[in-house]
């Protein structure tokens, strides 16, 4: 169990509506939700269903044909396909990096995996030739028939899972549809809010939308003449079966990222064009004509939307859905970026990115930080010194997660569109701000918008611009035990003139000396571009991360004693001044008027009381101050200011003592010091400050050298 791994736990999607005739089920996907087998199994995608159907046919064929048994005891091709165990008794799904169980093993499982990996490949190579020979002799008609159904397109490939027409009135996990729909069509008072119902371990989650009394669907509807129809309510219901320990977390993320957003988009479409009403009528007409489920998905855009939604979300992919003629994207964000190293016992997706800078960007959802998303923990607001991520992103660069032309093709944008041109001009060595300065056709607002979309579509990742002057190390989360074997070959194909992947990684993190600037491993200026491209590749697949520098202000015992003496002298001076002022004010004027005498007497008493109170407060403050300083002195330790941007009065006195008296900084360095003071908190990397605060490396180097006795510097990711 891990919240860092995707687990949508989606079993199916229902569309229920309510009209004058009462509630009714319009559409469901998958169509075989009556199957009790899904109670314990992970819901299969349509492509997996095809493979499952093929396996069933092959298994049946194997049992009916004894001639397929090999007399030498070797497994036939049919047995190889239908058996879900490999030579070592490990299920095939455990070898699939896209399967949840792949990352759930113990350390013993991992060692066993590594020991058996080479033997398994060798055995597969030995069996390959024999399997090819058997394939030519044992192909049979059921398999050919199954494949022929899906020869038109990938979309039709998935639709072959609907191997026969299933009635809309079939039971749904043993529940009669009429009884279930009654519960899924709540009254108006329970609509337009989160709906969650549990029946026999199944979670029915949705956001039922009910029209208003005036016939409109939105409270701020500007239509004066609402569309007239007999549709009163619609409800898109997601059926889930998450693990008990993850129940609340998985339901919350599904509702937040998918259910609520799709339902609101459908409400808008219904309000504008009666989309749900018209599609419901179309679906009913198609069913009356006796067409099968494949035809239903082909002819109804709403059914196709539900089909695409289930297919993508159940596989933890981005769902690009066509709703009322417009493409909308939905997804449950996957956690591939971490600002701290997860516990060794907690699995995560291989190749995840590790950098403390992602915490700065997580506030506005630019990245989905794994450890900040655990159920029951709210994302803490950033401190004031950490700028809004919507603004700070311009100082970061984009790292494409695929080749530019592949991304352009996959997102189905025109090859000569502005977005396509932007994708081609992206360089991981340039910040978005520099990209905007280099291309006058795109302003920074457009560039930020494109960047947000590419990140959301999982086509790019935000990083600090790659530089030969920066320091890079092997990431503690590098997939060395999982993907290194295959990536060695990929790296060699991609960069044939560079050192091998293991040697390249060794150059970045040598054992004999500390990590150094990336420029130190580049043989010559001619190799610079190819080495930076290799560095981008290593960043993309999580092998390396940038080493960053963080500093705190350190207050020595000497500084604290000096400031304490100054405060004490200042208090004594104030006490003498207050005493002199009190003596001048205590003057009683004699007069024959008794009332004036009484008034003067009262005035004197109040002033005397005020003076006494002031003196008492001063003494009490002095006593408290002395007590605090004495505690500090007894510790005989330096004090670290954790948040200098919000320094207290005493901490500001310590800081001033350092820069004016101890270090005696010049006016130029004082300006730089106060510009960077709020970043001396151990959280903001100096490398980021260089990008965004217009401070040169030389200026920063001079300042750090001048105050080196009063800072603590650490380097990590």
Image (cartoon, grey):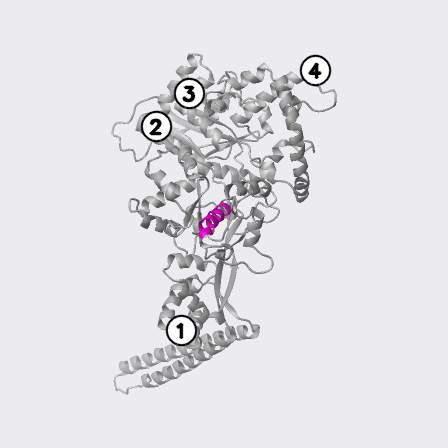
Contact (CB < 8 A) between labels 3 and 2?
no
Which is nearer the N-term, disc 1 or disc 3?
3
> In whole angstroms, how far apart are the C-alphas of marks 4 and 1?
92 Å
Report the residue marked by disc 4. 67
Q: Secondary structure beneath disc 4?
A: helix
Which is nearer the N-term, disc 1 or disc 2?
2
The residue that appears at 55% across and 32% down in the rendered structure is 241
Report the residue marked by disc 2. 325
Contact (CB < 8 A) between labels 3 and 4?
no
Q: Secondary structure beneath disc 2?
A: loop
Disc marking residue 665: 1
Which is nearer the N-term, disc 4 or disc 2?
4
| Near-viewer residue (566 or 500) | 500
Residues shaded magenta: 526-538
The image quarter in which residue 98 lies: top right
Which is nearer the N-term, disc 3 or disc 4?
4
């Amino acid at each position: 169990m891990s919240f860092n791994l995707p687990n949508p736990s989606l079993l199916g999607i229902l569309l229920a509506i309510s009209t004058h005739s009462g509630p009714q089920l319009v559409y469901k996907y998958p169509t075989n939700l009556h199957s009790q087998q899904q109670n314990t199994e992970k819901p299969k995608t349509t492509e997996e269903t095809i493979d499952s159907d093929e396996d069933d046919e092959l298994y049946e064929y194997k049992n009916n044909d004894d001639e397929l048994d090999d007399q030498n005891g070797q497994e036939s091709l049919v047995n190889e396909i239908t058996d879900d165990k490999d030579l070592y008794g490990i299920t095939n799904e455990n070898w699939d990096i896209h399967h949840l169980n792949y990352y759930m093993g113990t350390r013993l499982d991992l060692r066993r995996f590594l020991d058996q990996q080479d033997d398994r490949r060798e055995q597969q190579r030995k069996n390959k030739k024999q399997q090819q020979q058997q394939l030519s002799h044992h192909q049979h008609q059921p398999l050919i028939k199954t494949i022929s159904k899906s020869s038109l397109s990938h979309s039709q490939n998935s639709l072959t899972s609907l191997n026969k027409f299933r009635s809309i009135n079939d039971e749904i996990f043993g529940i009669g549809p009429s009884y279930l729909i009654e519960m899924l069509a709540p009254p108006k008072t329970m609509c337009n809010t989160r709906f969650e119902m549990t029946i026999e371990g199944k979670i029915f989650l949705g956001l039922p939308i009910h029209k208003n009394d005036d016939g409109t669907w939105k409270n701020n509807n500007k239509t004066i003449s609402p569309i007239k129809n007999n549709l009163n309510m619609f409800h898109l219901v997601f059926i889930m079966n998450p693990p008990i320990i993850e129940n609340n977390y998985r339901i919350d993320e599904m509702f937040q990222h998918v259910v609520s957003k799709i339902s609101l988009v459908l409400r808008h479409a219904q309000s504008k064009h009666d989309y749900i009403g018209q599609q419901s009528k179309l679906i009913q007409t198609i069913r009356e004509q006796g067409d099968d489920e494949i035809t239903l998905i082909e002819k109804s855009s709403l059914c196709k939307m539900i089909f695409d939604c289930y297919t993508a979300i159940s596989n933890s992919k981005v769902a690009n859905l066509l709703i009322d003629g417009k493409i909308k994207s939905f997804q449950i964000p996957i956690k591939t970026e971490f600002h701290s190293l997860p516990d060794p016992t907690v699995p995560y997706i291989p190749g995840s990115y590790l950098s403390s800078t992602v915490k700065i960007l997580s506030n506005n959802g630019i990245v989905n930080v794994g450890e900040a998303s655990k159920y029951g923990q709210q994302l803490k607001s950033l401190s004031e010194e950490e700028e809004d991520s919507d603004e700070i992103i311009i100082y970061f660069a984009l790292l494409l997660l695929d080749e530019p032309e592949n991304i352009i093709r996959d997102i189905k944008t025109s090859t000569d569109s502005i977005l396509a041109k932007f994708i081609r001009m992206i360089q991981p060595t340039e910040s978005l701000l520099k990209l905007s300065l280099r291309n006058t056709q795109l302003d920074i607002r457009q560039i930020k918008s494109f960047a947000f979309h590419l990140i959301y579509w999982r086509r790019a990742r935000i990083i600090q611009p790659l530089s030969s002057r920066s320091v890079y190390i092997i990431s503690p989360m590098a997939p060395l035990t999982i993907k290194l074997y295959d990536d060695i070959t990929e790296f060699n194909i991609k960069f044939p003139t560079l050192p091998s992947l293991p040697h390249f990684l060794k150059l970045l993190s040598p054992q004999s000396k500390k990590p150094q600037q990336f420029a130190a491993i580049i043989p010559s200026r001619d190799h610079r571009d190819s080495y930076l491209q290799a560095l981008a590749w290593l960043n993309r697949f999580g092998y390396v991360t940038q080493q960053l520098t963080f500093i705190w202000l350190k207050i020595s015992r000497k500084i604290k004693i000096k400031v304490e003496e100054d405060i004490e002298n200042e208090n004594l001076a104030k006490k003498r001044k207050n005493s002199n002022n009190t003596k001048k004010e205590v003057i009683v004027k004699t007069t024959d008027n008794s009332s004036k005498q009484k008034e003067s007497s009262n005035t004197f008493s109040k002033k005397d009381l005020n003076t006494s109170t002031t003196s008492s407060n001063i003494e009490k403050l002095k006593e408290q101050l002395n007590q605090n300083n004495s505690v500090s002195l007894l510790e005989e330790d330096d004090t670290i200011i954790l948040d200098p941007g919000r320094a207290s009065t005493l901490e500001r006195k310590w800081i001033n003592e350092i820069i004016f008296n101890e270090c005696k900084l010049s006016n130029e360095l004082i300006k730089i010091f106060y510009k960077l003071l709020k970043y001396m908190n151990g959280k903001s990397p100096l490398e980021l400050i260089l990008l965004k605060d217009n401070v040169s490396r030389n200026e920063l180097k001079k300042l750090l050298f001048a105050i080196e006795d009063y800072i603590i510097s650490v380097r990590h990711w």
